Amino acid sequence: QFLNRGRGPAVRGPRAQMDRDLYKEAMQRTLQDDSSIYKDRLTLIEASVEDLLYDERKAKSSVITSSSGQTTANIMNGVNGNYIIPQNDEDRFRIQGVEIKKNDDNESSEELYAPSVVITTGTFLRGMLLLGHDRFAGGRQLRTDEDLIEPPSVGLAHTFMEKFKFQLGRLKTGTPARINGDTIDWSVCPIQPTENPATPFSFLAEGRNPRNIAADRIIACHQSATNDKTHELVLKYEDTLPRYDGGLDGTGNGPRYCPSIYKKVQRFPERKSHNCFLEPEGLNTNLVYPNGMSGPYPPEIQLEILRTMKGLEEVEIIKPGYDVEYDFCNPLHTIGHTLETKLVKGLYLAGQICGTTGYEEAAAQGIMAGANAASSNEPFILGRDEAYIGVLIDDLVTRGTTEPYRMFTSRAEYRISLRQDNADLRLTEKAAQAGLIASPDRMQALKHRQDEITTSLQQLNDFSLKVTDWAEQYPETMGYAKKDRTDKKTAVQVLQMPHVTLDQILSVADIDIPFRVADTVEAMIKYQAYEESQQRDMESWRKAQGMTLPATLVYSQEHLPTLSAEELEKLNLQRPRTLADAAKISGITPQSLVYLHQHVNKIFAKQKQQQKENLKEEEDLSSRRQQHAS
C-alpha cells in the first residue's frame, strides 16, 4: 500500500506487509546459497558473542578517574565516575575481534579476529522479559514457541560498563499477543485492501507487480478498535502490569509514539476508541498480529481485554504479548557520525543499542555502521539535507536521547526535498562512491531516470500558451483571465499554481512524460519555491542561535500551536536560555526551532513597539507639563 497517497509527495511512502517465514527463508537464501553474489564475500557463523577482544594497553592510558589530560581529551560523566573520550587515535582502545560461543554441545569459546566490529544487540543487552509480575532473563521469546526464550547478552554489557565506562540506560518496548486467525470474525472487521498493481520499493523493479499480488496470493489485513469496555478493563487491571528498572517510579521508559494500550488510554482519556490493525503473519500460518494492542498484562487479562473488541469476541491467544527491557548506550557521549565509538577504534554500534526503536531506524544505522566499518576510504556520512538517515544519526550524536527514538518527517528541516520519489537521485551516486553498489544495472537505471527527468523538465519549460488559453481549459484551478491579455505562461509556471496537477497540464500540452518520473517531475516543480523558502528560514535560524529566550516565555499550545505536546513538555521542563540551548534538547525539531525563533522575534518586535509608544507618551506628557508651567 502507498501511504498518504492523497497528500503531498513529501509524506508519501510505500509500505508492504511481509510473510515473516517466507521473508526469512528468502533472505537466508540470498546470503547462503551457492548462487548468491555474496557467496565468496560473506561467512555466516551462528554463535553468541560473549565478549570483545581489544588492545588492553590502551585501557590504562584512556580511562581515568581524574581530570588530568583535559588539553587532549573531553571529560565525560560515566556510569562509575569520569572517563575520557580521547581526541587522538593513539589514546583509544583498539578493537581486535570478538569472543564467541557456538550454539552446540561444546561449551568452549572461540576467538574471531577482525579490524572492525559492529554491535547490534537489539533488545538483548541485559534483556529482561516482563509478563505481568513475572520476569525472565532474555532478549526475545520466539513467536512460534511460547516456552523458548533467547538468552540475553550479559558479557557485553559488563565490558561496556566496567571496561569502557559507557553510559548505559534502560529502555523498554513491547509486542502484542499473537492470536488465532481462525477464531476471528473477519466479516465484521473492515478490510484494509492491498493495492493491485502495487508500487515497488526499488526503481529497478519499476513496472513489475510482485508475484504474490499478481497471482492474487495475498491475505488482506483488517481493522478492529477498542471501546469503552476495553478501556475500563485496561485501567482496572493497572496493578497487574510489570515494574521496570528504568523510567519514573518503575513505570519503564518506553516509546512515546507507539505506546502500549495502557499508555494510550491513560494519556488520552477523551478518546473513545483506538485503532487495532489485524495483520496476518503469513500465507501458511493462522498467527495474527493485533497491531496497536501491546500490553504485558497476565495472559488471562490480555484475553479478557481482546475479547471486548469487535470481531474478537471469541478470539484465542496463541502466545501472550510481553515487554522487554534492555540496556542502551547514550549516543551523545558514545558514538560519532560514522557510528564508531569515541573510545574504541574499530567498534561500531547500530540499532536499539543507540537508543532507537523500530525496524527502519535499526536498518538505517546498520547500513551506515557496516559501510564505515568495511571502508578504508573517507568516512561515509550523510547530512541532514541529504537523507532521513542523516537526520536520525545527527539527532542521536548531537542531542542524545532519553527515550526510544523514532524517525518522523517532522524531525527533518529539509523534509520537502527528502522524498521517496527522489531517493535514488539523492543517494545512489553517494553509495557508489562509498563502494556500496556492485550492480551496474543500478547505475544505468539512475542515469536513465536522470535523463528522462531532464528531458521532461525541458519540455514543460519550452511549452507555453497564452494565459487566456490556459484559463479556458481549467477555469476552476487555473483561474479566469481577461480576454485582452496576450502574455504567455509556460507549463512549468502554470504547474507551480496551487491546485493545478501534472495530469491537467499533459491533457493540454502535447508532451510525453514517462510514468516512472512523473511524480518526481511534478514534485520538483511544485516544491521549488517552498525549498527556496525553507533554505532561507534555516539560514535565518542558524544566524540567530545566540538569541536569548525570554524567561517569561509561555510554552503552550495556545502560544505555539505548531509545536507537538512532546516539544512543549520538554521546553517547559528545561526552560532553555537561548535558541542554541533549545536546539540541544532531544525531540525538538528544527522546524519548531524556526517557528520558535519567529515567535520570539514577534514578541521582541511588540516590546520594541510598546517601548516606542511609551516613550512617545512620556515625551507628550513632558511637553504638556512644560507648556503648563510656562
Image (cartoon, rainbow, N blue to C red):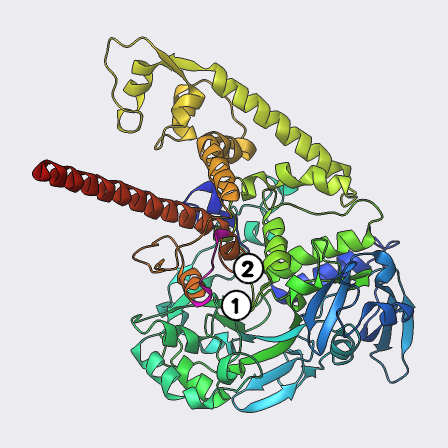
Residue 496 in the image, given as x and y percentages of width and height: 41, 28
Badge 1 marks a residue whose secondary structure is strand
Taking the image as drawn, is residue 145 in sight? no
Q: Give the class, few, some or many, for how many residues have Cα within 10 Å of label 1's Cα (few <14, many ≥20).
A: many
Give the x, y percent position of residue 4: 44, 49
Q: Is residue 382 above or below residue 137?
A: above
Against 417, residue 230 (above or below) is: below
Q: Relative to residue 88, is residue 532 depicted above or below?
A: above
CA gap, disc 1 to disc 2? 9 Å
Pick the front one: 475 or 166? 166
**Range of magenta residues:** 573-579
Q: Amino acid at mark 1?
A: Pro
- Farthest residue, direction front: 630
Single out the mark in the foreground, 1 or 2: 2
The residue at the point 67 percent across, 57 percent down is 365
- The residue tagged 1 is 280
Q: Position of residue 312 (x, y in %)?
A: 40, 77
- Along the line of sight, which residue is nearer the eye, 2 or 352? 352
Residue identified by numbered label 2: 17
Q: Amino acid at mark 2?
A: Gln
Q: Circle 2 sits in a helix, a strand or a loop, which is it?
A: loop
Residue at 71% in and 56% down = 336
Q: Residue at x 49, y 84 (%)?
A: 249
Quadrant position of residue 370: bottom right
